[in-house]
Amino acid sequence: MTQAFDILVVGAGMVGAALATGLGQNGFRVAVVDRAPAPRFDPATTPDIRVSALSAGSERYLQSLGAWDHITRMRATPYRRLAVWDETRHPLTDLIPRKLAEVQFDANELGAAHLGHIVENSVTQQALWQTAEACPQVTLIQGHGVSSLTQAGNSATVTLDDGSELVASLVIGADGAQSRIRDLAGIGITRNQYDQQAMVISVRYQGAVDDITWQGFHPSGPRAFLPLHSAGAAHPGESWASLVWYDSPDELARLKALDDSELMAALQSAFPACLPMLTHIDHRASFPIARQHARHYHSGRVVLAGDSAHTINPLAGQGVNLGFQDAQALQAILREAKRAGDDLAAPEWLERYERQRRPANRRMMLTMDMFYHLFSNRIPPVHLVRNLGLGAARALPVARNRVARYAMGIDEELPPVVRQITARIPGLSQL
């Protein structure tokens, strides 16, 4: 059986489901394919171990799709403050008072109600599936993967693992870092593996839901706290949080092998003193960290978005926010192509998308790499530089807050001076 569509989206994760919804709402006939079944949400369950810090910009986008109300009816935790500081102890530390090397961003100072929301990935995905299912232009095909891709003439044909065929003018690969569509389209990648891995732990703690998320930077990697929701009547006075511990693969393997009581003691000892008293560990998982960038964002009738096109160090939780920015840009460009009566896969339109998104994604990659290398060592001069940098950020609130407004998606562009600086950084064009 062969079905024909305007656009085929492969991958129904957060970015793919958002693209399918937005394109369907713009009048395109869209099919979205994913191996996984539809996500489900049960308010009685413990939190999904996978969470994202959705920026204000992502919130606006999800509101435009009609998904944000679904998210807030499930679970989403606003955070109004974000704190960072250096936890490395060294003789040079005594030259700089501790408070001068701590920076806190506050929504009130940025003129915003909040900086963002911590949301479980499964909640965001289910909300987007609900909006996609509500759109008559969108066909959801679940439980099937892609076997092959052929491009000929004015269409592309994707064959699924059950032998059925889907024909479309354009295929969007939104199927993640190990993208099958990217491989079938012959699009190569550059990849840099970091020495660190990240371990994520879902915990309960004593206290109310906090409105701050923070990262303390250690030479072995940062340790972060992301607040979630109340633990409910079953655990009065307790709340859920997600902890992230970056370290060497060997150290994380040791930590994962500990029983819950031993791991809880390790967390209370190794994390900053502001970590609340933990009462329970629910889930734990670790994953490698890599920076990855597609050599091209499109080839023939295939275009990439989200993790299929780029992955970054998750230090600031910007990965899905970049993916949503890809989705918005691609939707706008395809809408223009349709209005002009052009082929959706015409190179001039897909090249315009790449010109918009590649530099923005490279800038974020470079920024995360700079943080990674600046904070992941004990070299005394570097230690001094990073503390001076944090001190300068604390002492220059206007500049700090303007950059923060961009990073949180409150403003659409970096301040002009910062754009000029990043444009001159060597190596940016190679990312």
Image (cartoon, helix red, strand yellow):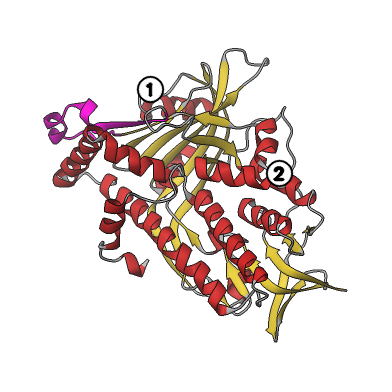
Q: Nearer the viewer, residue 271 or 66?
A: 66
Residue 108 % position (x, y): 41, 27
SS of the residue at dot 2? helix
Which residue matches tag 2?
A: 126
> In the rendered view of the protein, which quadrant contains the N terminus?
bottom right
Q: Nearer the viewer, residue 430 or 313?
A: 430
User: The magenta stretch spans which residues?
Assistant: 85-107
Which residue matches tag 1?
A: 274
Residue 94 % position (x, y): 13, 29
Asked whether residue 218 appears in the rendered view, the answer is no
Which residue ends up furthest to the bottom in the rendered image? 153
**Horizontal side of residue 208 vs 43, given as left or right:** left
Crowd tier of the residue under label 1, counting other residues whose Cα lies within 10 Å: few below 14, some 14–19, many 20 or above = few
Q: Is residue 187 magenta?
A: no
Q: Which amino acid lies under the numbered mark 1 shown in the image of this protein?
A: Cys
Residue at 76% x, 49% y is 38
Q: Is residue 98 magenta?
A: yes
Q: Is residue 113 above or below residue 328?
A: above
Q: Is residue 191 above or below residue 109?
A: below
Query: Real-space Cα distance between discs 1 and 2?
Result: 33 Å
Residue 93 % position (x, y): 16, 32
> In the rendered view of the protein, which quadrant contains the C terminus?
bottom left
